[in-house]
Amino acid sequence: ADDAEERSSLIPLPYDYVVPGGRFSEVYYWDSYFTILGLKSQKRFDLIQSMVRNFAHLIDTLGFIPNANRNYYLTRSQPPFFSLIVRELEDYDSSAAERYLDPMVREYEFWLDGLDSVRNPGDAVKHVVMMSDGTVLNRYFDKGRGPRPEAYKEDFALAQKHVGDTNKLYRDLRSAAESGWDFSSRWFADGKNIASVHTTDILPVDLNCLMYHMERMIAKGYAQRGDAGAGSEYSKRADQRRRALLTFFWDADKSYFFDYDFVAGKRCEIKSLAGIYPLFFEMVPEDIAKKASMVIENEFLKPGGLVTSLVDSDQQWDAPNGWAPLQWMTYKGLKNYQNNTLAAEIRRRWLRQNERVYEATGKI
């Protein structure tokens, strides 16, 4: 057993955790937030606490939370949901923001590493990019080189046919994996083909909403600790990011939120459910939320629930596929703005679809 453990790619964790199941036998970062919501409904506070402690342990020992606890994921993280997991803990422990403040700050520093080096609009270092108005926003960025170890064959095959910089191709493939949306037309310059992937040119709307929440939670943690100065600094950063959301991501003509291509200096074309994150985090005024909700109802709602994007690209994070976490986040986002009718309809259709598939196949 010791010999097998020495050869294992698994990063050991001190406490119990839940894996996604199927072929996955390690804990995945952003999946865990939704697992924890399920554990909450079962009153499994013990297991929730162990998972939070594991994530804090990863931040303490590695400086960030990797995609999953495998050593081949040490070049990238995943959508930063740690501050949301801490928020869920507040139901059991009102001082959770203060208790986990240090790991939250350390994770924030990982996502803002390189901040001192971006001085002019368009400067981009690691996860940070400076905008035309001086605001600093975030992108996905895997610092590794070459094909992804977990998908070596596919990445290498794509590079063989690639005209252009293969190092950038590999980085863009890896960085799309950091987004959790691997793969989606969101990351493709032509909106169709994976060969046109350009993830590192894109400021994702969902990532920047997650960063806003992290700033809010860190501000709360500092306030609980009695450090009003640091608290107001992070509140100010959150407010600045919220203003940037409306400047760069909101398209008034199309009444929806889009990713932003900072290299091209314009919003991306692909409409996806990433555009519901501002509603999930209650970042926008009522009228904007209402307009975005109409797009959800008119364009994303299908008989089985919500499609992930409006493009059928053969990628898993596109039409006609629906993903449970995005149904949930849209449902919550709509409820935040009292759009209860549409929220209930999404819930009804999605649950009915799951029941139908389960009855037919015995699988969820």
Image (spheres, rainbow, N blue to C red):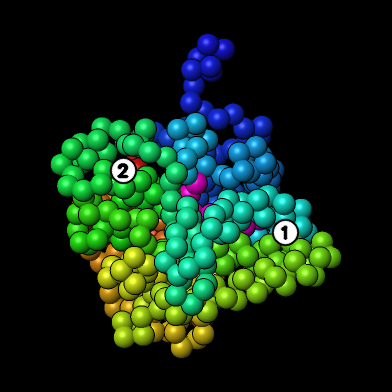
Q: Position of residue 166 (x, y in %)?
A: 26, 43
Q: Position of residue 312 (x, y in %)?
A: 20, 59
Residue at 84% across, 65% down: 226
Mark 1, Cα crowd under 10 Å, few <14 / some 14-19 / many 20+, is many
Tell me the element at label 2. Answer: helix
Is 80 a magenta residue? yes
Type of amino acid under label 2: Asn
Of 72 and 28, nearer the camera is 72
Q: Position of residue 170 (x, y in %)?
A: 31, 43
Type of amino acid under label 1: Ala
Q: Which residue is mark 1?
A: 97
In the rendered structure, which segment of residues is drawn in magenta? 77-86
Q: Which mark is residue 304?
A: none
Of 41 and 29, nearer the camera is 29
The alpha-carbon separation of the residues under discs 2 and 1 comes to 40 Å
Residue at 58% across, 59% down: 116
Q: Which mark is residue 167?
A: 2
Residue at 36% across, 34% down: 150
Q: Is residue 116 visible?
A: yes
Q: Position of residue 184 (x, y in %)?
A: 30, 55
Residue at 68% across, 62% down: 218
Mark 2, Cα crowd under 10 Å, few <14 / some 14-19 / many 20+, is few
